[in-house]
Amino acid sequence: MFALKLFCVLFVAVSILGCGSGKSTVPPPVTISVSVAMKRLALAAQQTQSVSATTNDSAGVTWTATGGSFSAKNSSSGAGITYTAPSVGGSYTLTATSVSDSTKNAAITVYVTDLASVSTYHNDLARDGANNKEYALAPATVNTSSFGKLFSCPVDGVIYAQPLWMAQVPVKVGGVTAKHNMVFVATQHDSLYAFDAEAIPCLQLWKVSLIATDHGAGAGETPVASAGANRRVGSGYGDIAPEVGVTGTPVIDAGTGTLYVVSKSIDSTGSTIYQRLHAIDIATGGEKFAGPANIDAGITFPGTGDGGATVSFNAQQQHQRAGLALVNGVVYVAWASHEDTAPYYGWVVGFKASDMTVKSVVNVSPNVQYGGIWMGGGAPSVDSENNLYVITGNATFDASNSAAPDNDYGDSFLKLSSELAVSSYFTPSDQQSDAVNDADFGSGGSSVVLNLPTGTVKHLLIGGGKDGTLYVLNGDNLGGAGDSNARQAFNIGNSIFATGAFWNNSFYIAPVGGPMVAYKFDPATNLFATGAQSQSLGSYGFPGATPSVSAAGTTNGIVWALDNGSYCTPQSPGCGPAVLHAYNAASLGADLWNSSKVASDAAGYAVKFTVPTVANGRVYVGTRGNNVGDDESSTTVPGELDVYGIKAN
């Protein structure tokens, strides 16, 4: 018995001490670890997202959040759990904590925007270009480490129109309906695309051709050639090349889920050119309201410019360059020329959104032609009382005549009623010189409207054109002819082909050949300081830049702008990528980031007058892909949407 006990003791000792091997067989204590696959997320309000954590804790992790909710409390290692973002925008933290060791955890920062949409040119009807509900993009997060190009979406033509964005739209894909944040892209090939705004790689939800037979076209219609031997519009300068389809930025009615867009096409025989207003279901791409509506010579206005008592709309000569405006159930569309090729006029037509019938019409130069409304691609701006404001191009001005003709408004700032009656105007003192020297007052954006809460001035406007003068006007009464009728007039040194952005009492704009500049607004006097508050180190080539601003209310402002100086078409000095710049809005003195710093961030080739769209931690940029202005068949990527944003890690 004693021998047996001794054997057992020796056996246990050997087992514990690992005798004969020099190693202990007692397993070391387990060190719990927790990690997450992504450290940053940008979501729309109430958007759902699968998140997961990796852990060696067999009991898994417990999830907590400073806002929003989870589909379950716990998850095992690597298993997805559904997070639903809160309805209020802001920055939130999701934490995965080991069940067995509460000191071990990992966190995800979630930036939630309660921005519903960017549904119109330059963000809103005031055209101020500001998204004040952006929480992911801030001076601290926009750098080459945490921000960059996420993905690209190829399209079938050059993108001149600003991309539009909508949050949480129910879309059926593959028989399954789910909510998507969506970005909408219109091309010069007369196509309209809807992409998931975030999916990597690019996810196309639907695509339609606006010149297909199910969208009102005849068989064989094509976009209109604007360059080469088959050119049917313009004077041969190739300002827009290689074709014209959709140029003006569409507009979305969020209430009805309808996108309105104007297409241009030519029939299979090459004899008839069409323009049509389409009402597109944003969930399916289908036509609505028995559309489209033909825009043709049936639209007339009293005037002698055609040699008779009335003038008629000419679908071939009129170029739909300005962005569309949706106001109180009416879609307003403006036109100018193709490369100043006469005959053309400055038209604005209001279409009822519900059935696209013509509701109102104005021709701003009916007796003299010219006077186009194009505004560097800008859209009519609108005040809080539904008045519209536009700036016209070169034409005769005779509105101050004591007798007819007295309704031609060349190179003028116009206030239009909702019925498109001219209720007041401002015409600069150098109007005649502008007209003679092709120095359009209307080369710049339609204006920025400040709807002032107090004081005798309810609405304040700011805009300018080729002579480089910014005019600040009283929107309640624009004042008439002469610079003395402006509240302010100050020259910024270079031509303006842009719509400025307004945020936090600062106005931002980049003229041709000059830097991005900021001017401070004093709400006590309703005047701007005429010296630049700050400016960028670098300059912008033609056509300057229309900036956009992202911010969290009045903090973390970033000014975004595209340098499109190498825009490829014949009059461009060269062909190269668009360069997206990000500046601290508080001081423009240095780039926070730009897309030329890292090779993988390079955008497609530039398109003049294009505007970036900023939403939900991402920036959307329309380009011409690798097209250099030749026919689509000459290029592998005839157009491209580039998407920049916060990186997951």
Image (cartoon, rainbow, N blue to C red):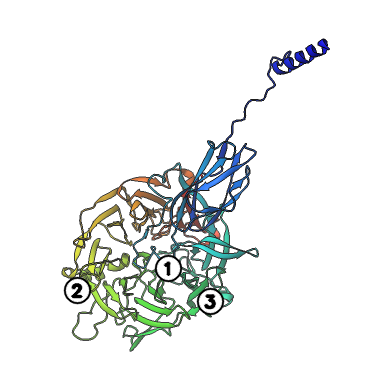
Mark drawn on residue 248: 1
Residue type (three-letter) at the residue carrying disc 2: Ala
Residue farthest toward the right in the current orientation of the protein: 1
Mark 3 vs mark 1: which is more N-terminal? 1
Mark 3 vs mark 2: which is more N-terminal? 3
What residue did someone put label 3 on? 288
Residue shown at 56% from the left, 78% from the top = 218
Q: Position of residue 159 (x, y in %)?
A: 47, 61
Q: Position of residue 537 (x, y in %)?
A: 30, 46
550 shown above or below 34? below
Q: Position of residue 133 (x, y in %)?
A: 40, 57
Image quadrant holding the N terminus, namely top right
Residue nearest the observer in this picture, 642 or 476: 476
Mark 3 vs 1: CB contact within 8 A: no
User: Along the horizontal axis of the image, is 185 left or right of 369?
Assistant: right
Dot 2: within a 10 Å radius of its alpha carbon, few (fewer than 14), some, or many (20 or more) residues? some
Residue farthest toward the left in the current orientation of the protein: 484
Q: Secondary structure at mark 1?
A: loop
From mark 2 to mark 1, how far is it between C-alphas?
Answer: 30 Å
Residue type (three-letter) at the residue carrying disc 1: Gly
247 shown above or below 347? above
Residue shown at 70% from the left, 21% from the top = 25
From mark 3 to mark 1, how far is it between C-alphas?
Answer: 20 Å
Closer mark to the observer between disc 3 and disc 2: 3
224 shown above or below 29? below
Dot 3: within a 10 Å radius of its alpha carbon, few (fewer than 14), some, or many (20 or more) residues? some
Q: Secondary structure at mark 2?
A: strand
What residue did someone put label 2 on? 481
Dot 1: within a 10 Å radius of its alpha carbon, few (fewer than 14), some, or many (20 or more) residues? many
